[in-house]
Amino acid sequence: MADRTGEEQQAICTHIRTAVLSAENSGLDITTDPPEALIITADYMGTIEFITSKESLSISDMEAKWTAHSSGCSDCNGWSL
Amino acid sequence: MAWTAPKTWATDEIILASGTGSLNEQIRDNMNQLSVHAHTGAAGDGSATLSGVSFSNIAGFQFADQSTNPTVTGTIQRNSVDILYYDGSVAVDLTAADQAAGTPSLRSLGTGATEAAAGDHQHTISTSETAQTAPTYAAGSAWNGGDTGVYTIGNSTYTATGSNKILVANFWYGAKNTYIPSGLGFIGAFTYDLAFIYNSATKKTVSGVTPAASSDQNVGTVIYSCQFLPNGTASTAWSLTANKTSTNGTTYILTGVAKINIIEVAVTM
């Protein structure tokens, strides 16, 4: 598969944040020190990764949620953890 | 003396010494003709050129030593103890083994430089760090609290030192606020999208980083990493950009800062 462009990387991050992990994202509190963050990374090889500083969020739970969502999702097709 | 088509004899026919149908014509002259004729392709002479010949049960061919290599395309020829084939540019020695790389030849199995690997085999890969650079960068422009948009935090060029290299880029991002109203510290954090770009292609996107920050301090993100192949040994541009995506109405002078580490790893096997 061809390398993922910067636009495609940004698009999958936005898609996951809004369509898959919207509840987790809206629950972040950035007024704390350190601020709570849900970070999604994507690279040119088609790999995505979730990182969070919010202790109550589970990376494995979010990965499982995305895995369930990605089956049949054309936007997520070709991306992997 | 030409070849005479053999006569068909009849019962009680008289045998003559000479003339048409005589023993001299039929046997002597035809035998003489067979002994001296050239292979011209004429009737009875045969041809000097064989075509469409199929060999079977051949015990072997013996090539006469030509004491030189063939120079006519498509020719197989013996030179001393070697059999060579001229392919139009070089005389390939069909009997030599393990010739230099790039020269077609038989190969013995082994691990030598000119030997062929035997069947399933395993390469042992070794790596070594050949170069590293890790400067600290700061953007040339700053965001206010209400600003969004992209600034280049750090950029430079990198030239790989040779072939068979992998580049590993690690980067840390932070934001420094240098505007501190009287009696106030840094009271907000903003969200950014980061992109590491090499040779005009984004290698890694990091969405939603919210670096912790306090007054005039660089308290930033975790370290992010990506790896990619270098653009040969050409001097190639790279950059780290940050796109501020959240706002508030407070006045800040927010400068993106970054530590960017590029490691060059040599791969051999």
Image (cartoon, coloured by chain):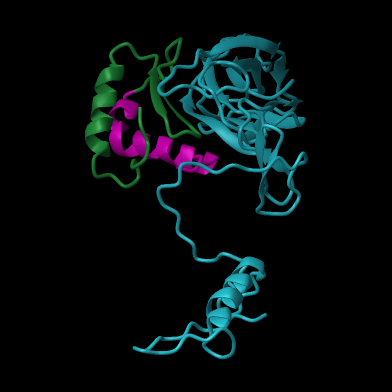
Chain colours: A green, B cyan
Q: Viewer-proximal residue, B243 or B167?
A: B167
| Residue B247 in picture, x, y percent from top left | 52, 31
Rendering quarter of residue B64:
top right
Question: What residue sits 42% from the left and 35% below the top?
Answer: A13
Relative to B24, residue B39 above or below: above
Relative to B14, residue A45 above or below: above
State whether residue B188 appears in this view. Answer: no
Q: Is residue B16 left or right of residue A46?
A: right
| Residue B68 in picture, x, y percent from top left | 77, 41
Q: What type of secondary structure mainly makes up the magenta span?
A: helix
Q: Is residue B121 left or right of residue A65?
A: right
| Residue A70 in picture, x, y percent from top left | 27, 38
Relative to B174, residue A4 above or below: below
Which image quadrant: the N terminus of chain A? top left
Question: What residue sits 38% from the left and 17% below the top?
Answer: A52
| Residue B89 in picture, x, y percent from top left | 74, 48
Q: Viewer-proximal residue, A75 or B60?
A: B60
Q: Is residue A25 left or right of residue B118?
A: left
Q: Magenta segment range?
A: A1-27
Which image quadrant: the C terminus of chain A? top left
Q: Viewer-proximal residue, B154 or B84?
A: B84
**Residue pushed farthest left?**
A68
Q: Viewer-proximal residue, B267 or B226?
A: B267
Rendering quarter of residue B40:
bottom right
Question: What residue sits 57% from the left and 76% below the top?
Answer: B30
Residue B214 in the magenta stretch? The answer is: no
State whether residue B128 appears in this view. Answer: yes
The mark total stands at 0
